[in-house]
Image: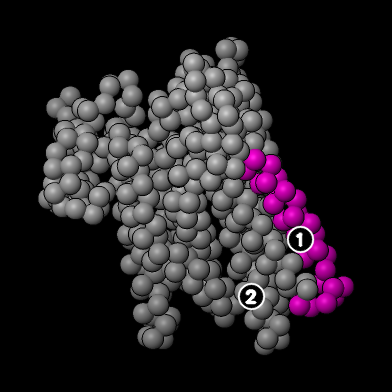
Amino acid sequence: MENLDAARLQMAFTLIFHIVFACIGMVMPFFMVVSHYKWLKTRDKIYLILTKSWQKGVAIFFVTGAVSGTALSFELGLLWPEFMKHAGPIIGMPFSLEGAAFFVEAIALGFYLYGWNKLPEKFHWFTGIIIGVSGVASGILVVAANGWMNSPTGFDYIDGKFLNINPIQAMLNPAWFTQALHMTLAAFTATGFAVAGIHAYQVYKKRKVELHKRAFKIAITFGAIAAILQPISGDISAKDIAKRQPVKLAAMEAHYNTEKGAPLYIGGIVDNESQDVNYKIAIPGMLSFLAFGDFDAEVKGLNDFPVDERPNVAMVHYAFQIMVGIGTLLLFAGILYFVSLKRKKWFTNNKYWLLFVLLAPMGFIALEAGWIVTEVGRQPWIIHKIMRTKDAVTPMSGIVFSFYTYVVVYLTLSIAVAWLMLRQIKVLNHSNS
């Protein structure tokens, strides 16, 4: 295996795992805080049991997110030294601020976990809010750094040198807001539906039904609201990509030829040789409208760009279709949940709970697909239009062994987390409520 392939696979593999841990760690504190608030208001013991159970989940994912995130930070220097040499001084600020947010989150988590019956109740509850806000801030700051890779700003690139560096401008690059908004909503959608699905399964199996129904409602409310808002965020992102990275948009749609009134493709199989998408559903003019707000607008095709500056079209197209397809499914599921609040009989129907059990992993599948679109769609650039990925990789040999080591470590970590969470659910089902 070539060094470049091994390095890219290692980065992709670790990100695939870390993004799940990080998103759950970002979002679950809000579920915990809502349950805690209901306990303070009602003194219903069910909410206290649920809060203490969720706080253990928050602690588990905080630790695993910290471990997997730390490994990723080492990888940047290990795998991409040429990138870090130049990018470090430019985008060091969001990483430094992310570290500060992480420490605030860690301190607040300590207060929350050990503050029961020791701190004033309202202050204790407020430390839970700090955990959630700090976690979201960490996520936004990391995405800001990724946004810079897609829209590099805050420096002048002259004769191969990065000059006149402005870290604030780099952090607040043109892509940071759209990416952060889309990513944050995706995290709430994925985690909301995943946690709701776990509790829906317990209701489906008739275990601690009242407790799990309340947990389900808290989690799915967050997930459903985020899923309903996500298409707005997606539209903003698509319009931004159309302006900054037209080749990525062309790959997302497997759109080869520049044309006005470009159609939107739904599904289909990419054929690079014939430069077409077979078995697709084409909606005339819709891509032009979604990208530029005009049904007759011109959309650039892949053939307008050099072959060596195009990403893997099939991979980007399929990932994009998966993301949009699942996002649409979860949008309707979110609407269905709010409709069900007016039809209480649905909550006694096992098919209702089975539906949300089946939807549990869908948000994270869409999340992973979205990151593939973002990262693979930027290739062959590690810094868009400035530095190619192949020029940033380490010259040292043997990276493939590092890749295999990371595979073992992350799989072990995932098995440990799964075991801890299953154990936690069993404890919750045997609690006195």
Q: Residue at x 35, y 73 (%)?
A: 336
- Residue lying at 79% horizontally and 57% vertically, measured from the top left: 107
Instruction: Relative to 137, say whether 317 is above or below.
Output: above
Q: Please say if 388 is above or below 175.
A: above
Look at the numbered disc 1 and give the secondary structure of its residue: helix
Q: What amino acid is labelled 1 in the image?
A: Ala
How would you rate the neighbour count of disc 2 (Cα within 10 Å): few for under 14, some for 14-19, many for 20 or more? Answer: many
Looking at the image, is 249 positioned above or below residue 332?
above
Magenta span: predominant SS is helix
For marks 1 and 2, the one nearer the N-term is 2
Place of residue 331 in the rendered image (x, y in percent of width and height, measured from the top left): 36, 64
Q: Nearer the viewer, residue 138 or 195?
A: 138
Label disc, if present, on residue 72 of the rendered structure: none
Residue at 14% from the left image edge and 38% from the top image edge:
259
Q: Position of residue 250 (x, y in %)?
A: 26, 37
Q: Which residue is nearer to you in this view: 348 or 394?
A: 394
Identify the secondary structure beneath mark 2: helix
Instruction: Decide if residue 349 is on the left or right side of residue 153.
Output: left
Between residues 303 and 207, which one lies in front from this camera angle? 303
Q: Is residue 219 left or right of residue 287?
A: right
Q: Amino acid under label 2?
A: Ser
Judge the density around disc 1: few (<14), some (14-19), many (≥20) Cα neighbours within 10 Å. many
Question: Which of the image's four quarters has the C terminus?
Answer: bottom right
Rendered image quadrant of residue 330: bottom left
Residue positioned 60% across, 56% down in the render: 136
Q: Is residue 83 above or below residue 181?
A: above
Q: Position of residue 167 (x, y in %)?
A: 60, 38
Query: Which mark is on residue 35?
Result: 2
The circle on residue 108 is 1
Quarter of the image holding residue 127?
bottom right
Magenta residues, start to end:
93-122
Furthest residue in direction right, as rendered: 118
